[in-house]
Image (spheres, grey):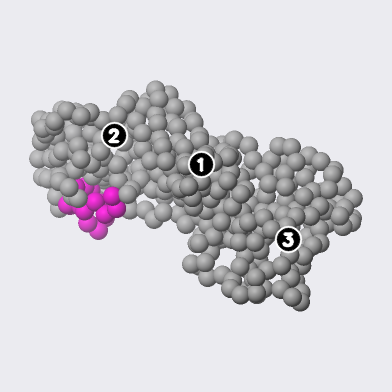
Amino acid sequence: MTLPGSAHACRRRLAPLALAGALGATTVLAAIVMTASPAAANPPMTHDPVGALEHVTALKGGVVRLQGWAADPDSQADATVYALLDGHKVDKTATSVARPSVTRQHDTGPTPGYDFTVPVPATGVHTLCTAVGNIGPGLTRVLGCRATPLGTQLSGTDLAAHSPTGAVTSVRATAKSFEVAGWSLEPDFRAGRMVVVLYVDGAPAATANTHLASAAQLTAGAGKRGAFDITVPVNKGAHNGCVWAVNTGFGYNALLGCTVADTRGGPGTAPLTEPKVNKAVVKEAKKHIGQRYVWGAEGPRKFDCSGLVMYSYSKAGYATPRIAQDQFAAARVIPAARAVPGDLVFYHDSEGAVYHVGIYLKPGVTVAAIDEQEGVAHQTIWDPTTATYGSFTHT
């Protein structure tokens, strides 16, 4: 039995809630661990500045005192620390407080500590964070956040509202590459650069830093430095790409969107009739309604999802790959509007991995080897946003 997340597990899968934030400033491959916990810390990479928000104290007159330390591994100079109120810079200071233990542990300059005050509105719940400016390679980083009035506990809904937002706005596949572009916003640091992660077909393909957004992206909701464009090499065929934004401050890492592209070009435009192969596939698949689902089974009396596809197509004289992910890569991507009976409906998760496939019958309905409880049966296309249509017989 393959582990959850494999392309051979023909079962409905839940989208992960968040990405652990162990990513950094340079474009490198990264393995991401999924977690449901708030990504309050985004551990630094080699050249990222480091530090902490250690103490937050309410003073008289609506003033809050912020204390901690910050440093940049590429410089012994005092670091610049920003105060962020509801995601906007409201003040800054240079580190100026001696912290011998920090200096020894992190090889900083002699005064890595900071201690300054900022006014906070007297009414309503607000968020207050500190961030350290980067020197040289690396990313300016959020060091910590608190909600005010101090002691306020943000609800799950509040935390979700502080998670990154954004969108994948374009995708293109060339003969050898997969390219995505879009924008993002970190509510707790609206002008800051972010780290985004591109998954392709269920595997981490690249991490990238965001950059200055265009006027159109700013209008759409991007942060000042929230634009991204990523290109990765891919093999010939269809590919699913999903982009995640790494959270800083309050909230969770966020899925910005998934999209599909085919290195062999776009779909056709000519009028369609149901190919002879497709008719034979549908006829064969329907014969097996009511039979058992068994993982890894290829027929003739028990099947898993991709096994039913392979068996039905083989009876029609067409050889297909064995597992759903490979069937997706081999099929031509088509829009739902061009699907005819006998084409395929693939389901992917929030990392772009195809985990289930059904044989298209009509809008909203497939025949598929579903799971141990339902066996081979008619199946509703339960979530069109995770479904991709493909065809072996036409574009």
Up the image or down, 389 lies above or below 86; here it is above
Residue 382 within the segment the image draws in magenta: yes
Q: Amino acid at mark 2?
A: Val
Q: Amino acid at mark 1?
A: Ala
Residue 68 pos. (x, y %)? 78, 60
Q: Amino acid at mark 3?
A: Leu
CB contact under 8 Å: marks 3 and 2: no
In the image, is 270 to the left or to the right of 137? left
3 or 2: tag closer to the N-terminus: 3
Residue matched to label 1: 215
Residue 87 pos. (x, y %)? 61, 57
Of residues 166 and 292, the one drawn nearer to the viewer in this rendering: 166
Residue matched to label 3: 53
Q: Quadrant of residue 211?
A: top right
Give neighbour class at mark 3: few <14, some 14-19, many 20+ (Cα, 10 Å): many
Check disc 2 and report its element: helix, strand or loop.
strand
| Rendered-image quadrant of the C terminus | top left
For the residues labelled 1 and 2, the Cα–Cα distance comes to 32 Å
**What segment is highlighted magenta in the picture?**
366-384
1 or 2: tag closer to the N-terminus: 1
Q: Nearer the viewer, mark 1 or mark 3?
A: 1
Residue 24 pos. (x, y %)? 63, 43
In the image, is 304 to the left or to the right of 276? right
Kindly identify which numbered label has been placed on residue 333. 2
